Amino acid sequence: MAEGIMSAPKVFFYVQHLLGIGHIARASRIANALAKDGCDVTVVTGGLPVPGFPGDGVKTIALPPVVASNAGFSGLADANGVAADSAFLERRRDLLLQAFRDASPDVVIIEAFPFGRRQMRFELLPLLDAIENATPRPKLLSSVRDILQENRKPGRDEETVALVQKHFDGILVHGDPGFVELQDTFPLTSEIAAKVHYTGMVVAPRAPEPTEVFDVIASAGGGAVGLDLLRAACDAASNLPSDLKWLLVSGPNLAEADFAALAEMTPPNATLVRFRKDFPSLLRGARVSISQAGYNTVGDLLQTDCRAILIPFVAGGETEQTVRAERLKALGLADVLPEGQLTPALVGKAVEDALASRRTAKVLLDLNGAEKTAAIIRSMIG
């Protein structure tokens, strides 16, 4: 292989987040690790801008953003909530293909697809064709979280396997197989097992000690969902002893009217914010965390001694967070509450129980996924 490619491999990383910020956060940490490993990294984003991501050290190309237009993630809308028409989608496709040609990468990483993001096939299938026709052809990798959404429609898993077998050189599974294996949520894993590489969980570096301490932190991830969680936490803060110090983190995507309504009901012992850059650090100082069970939030929690109360997101038939939460509960690392049955009393009782106990289970999961991903990619092109 040419010396230039050996010293600075060019990586083209596509990531499309539709609702929360978990996908862009994980992809950004991987991209940053690749850049530190000496790669020339271009991250192509397709969702709404998120503060702090993709981060320093990588080139960024922002396609005209799309978001999920319904709870089932089947429809797409533009940044203003208007249904994305064919002209809009064709423009995005053309911009993506031009970005690929301009980058002329040695490696292409596509986040989630073909295990997810089927609604992006209008631009990803043409990208696969462009990769196959490129000279030299870059390596093509799929980057997926440890737990996949259950496919409820017949034939979807078979379609995924066919795409992997035809186009992909490897599948990067960002999890610890001792916690959950790909086959646990993707039944046809045996047909593509030779291409699977486990990287460990991709988490942020361990945060420094906090500069401010809260007893209880309730957070809603990106904020597009989680309003009921925050309302219940707000009421619980009002009903529990007033000397408890609460922080409510709504996320940047909570609707302005909902944020204003929450602000009106926030008691004096609680602080409501949209975003805290030092959130992982604040978790280190907190006694209890109330959150959904998204990949990145759990990754932050696993690096603390904070008692976790998880409320898995289940709207639209989502299963991923429930699987993660229940496995953490089985290990003694979290308590779990049902999203559809939240009440201030239920949340308050869970907080009281968590405050009265300490987490004793040890975290033994591999949390070095970003660096291991970079090492795996380096070995595949070296």
Image (tube, rainbow, N blue to C red):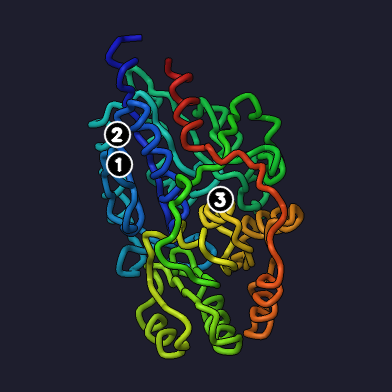
Q: Which residue is mark 2?
A: 100
Disc 1 crowd rating (10 Å Cα; few below 14, some 14-19, many 20+) is many
Instruction: Report the residue at 31% width, 17% height from top.
Output: 7
What quarter of the picture does the N terminus occupy?
top left
Question: Which marked residue is nearer to the observer: mark 1 or mark 3?
Answer: 3
Indicate the quadrant where residue 381 lies.
top left
Left or right for 325, reference 95: right
**Residue 4, x across and y down, in percent:** 27, 15
* Secondary element at tag 3: loop
Residue linked to disc 3:
303
Image point (67%, 42%), residue name = 364
Q: Residue furthest right?
A: 330
Q: Give x and y (percent) for residue 54.
A: 33, 47
Q: Residues within 10 Å of mark 2 (few under 14, many from 20)?
A: many
Using the rendered image of the protein, determine whether residue 250 is visible from the camera's viewpoint.
yes
Image marks 1 and 2: residues in contact by CB distance under 8 Å: yes
- Mark 1 or mark 3, earlier in chain: 1
Question: Could you give the CA–CA distance between mark 1 and mark 2, rounded to whole angstroms?
Answer: 6 Å
Q: CA distance from mark 1 to mark 3?
A: 36 Å
Point 60% across, 38% down: residue: 366
Q: Mark 2 belongs to which amino acid?
A: Phe
- Observer-nearest residue: 219 or 287? 287
- To which residue does mark 1 refer? 96
Residue 126 falls in image quadrant: top left
Q: CA distance from mark 3 to mark 2?
A: 37 Å
Q: How many numbered marks are there?
A: 3
Query: What residue sits 37% from the left and 36% below the top?
Result: 127
Q: Is residue 136 above or below residue 313?
A: above
Along the viewing direction, whichever of 137 and 280 lies nearer the viewer: 280
Give the mark nearest the N terminus, 3 or 2: 2
Instruction: Residue 266: name its quadrant.
Output: bottom left
Identify which amino acid the numbered label 3 is placed on.
Gln
